[in-house]
Amino acid sequence: MKHQEPASPTGRVGCDVIVVDDFPELATAIAEALGGRGLSTHVALNGEAAVALARNYNPVVALVDCVLPDIDGLHLIRQLGGAWPDTTFIAMSGDVGGISEDEARRLRIKAFLNKPLPMRVLAQAVERLVRSSGAGPMEREAPSAWISLGIGSPAGSGMPTIPGKLVQLR
């Protein structure tokens, strides 16, 4: 954990990213990749732990798995959205169907990530969201959407290649 802001009037500590995924290895890998970019992270392995984090932290970005053992991820995003009114959400899953773009916008879901995750690109995208959070609402960015299929690291970069799909909503 690198950077944390002091407690707000609500008593919550600011942090960059909350990762909610029931696969400990994946959640840890994401947190480590983001930590390597200087972002503070906290991990929750289920919805109950995420709700507990909501009492203490105020993240800029929350990555939430859509399929958790104790709660539907989209329901959790609705719940956390009330606790974290300024947080941008990224939904992660092997199957992110069943939600309209309008509903995703209402829930402040900025992107859907299909597993397996493109770790390097995931870290870049989250870092971009965190770093741009102080610049005003994300809607002020260029209006073009970005979609990448089969994202991985370039050959010879020394970074692991993890195929996946990254879709950002505008």
Image (cartoon, helix red, strand yellow):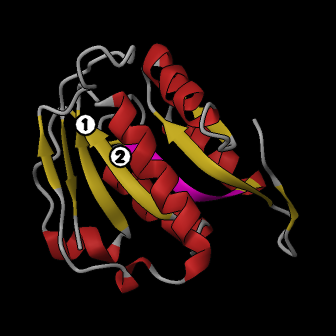
Where in the figure is residue 165, as x and y percent of width and height? 16, 39
Front residue (pair 5, 66): 5
The x and y percentages for residue 162 are 25, 21
- 73 left or right, relative to 96: right
- Nearer-N-terminus badge (1/2): 2
Quarter of the picture containing the N terminus is top right
Q: Amino acid at mark 1?
A: Ser
How many labels sit on residues?
2
Secondary-structure class at tag 1: strand
Question: Which of the labelled discs sits on residue 75, or is there none?
Answer: none
Tell me, yes or no, whether the highlighted magenta stretch contains residue 46: no
Q: Residue 132 location, x and y as percent?
A: 53, 69
List the residue tagged with mark 2.
Answer: 73
* Residue at 52 percent of width and 56 percent of height: 61
Q: Residue at x 80, y 51 (%)?
A: 4
The C terminus sits in image quarter: bottom left
- Magenta-span inclusion, residue 61: yes
Q: Label 2: state its secondary structure.
A: helix
44 up-or-down from 25: above or below:
below
Where is 15 relative to 101, above or below? Answer: above
- Relative to the observer, which residue lies in front, 148 or 21? 148
Residues rendered magenta in the picture: 58-64
Left or right placement of residue 63 versus residue 147 in this view: right
The alpha-carbon separation of the residues under discs 1 and 2 comes to 9 Å
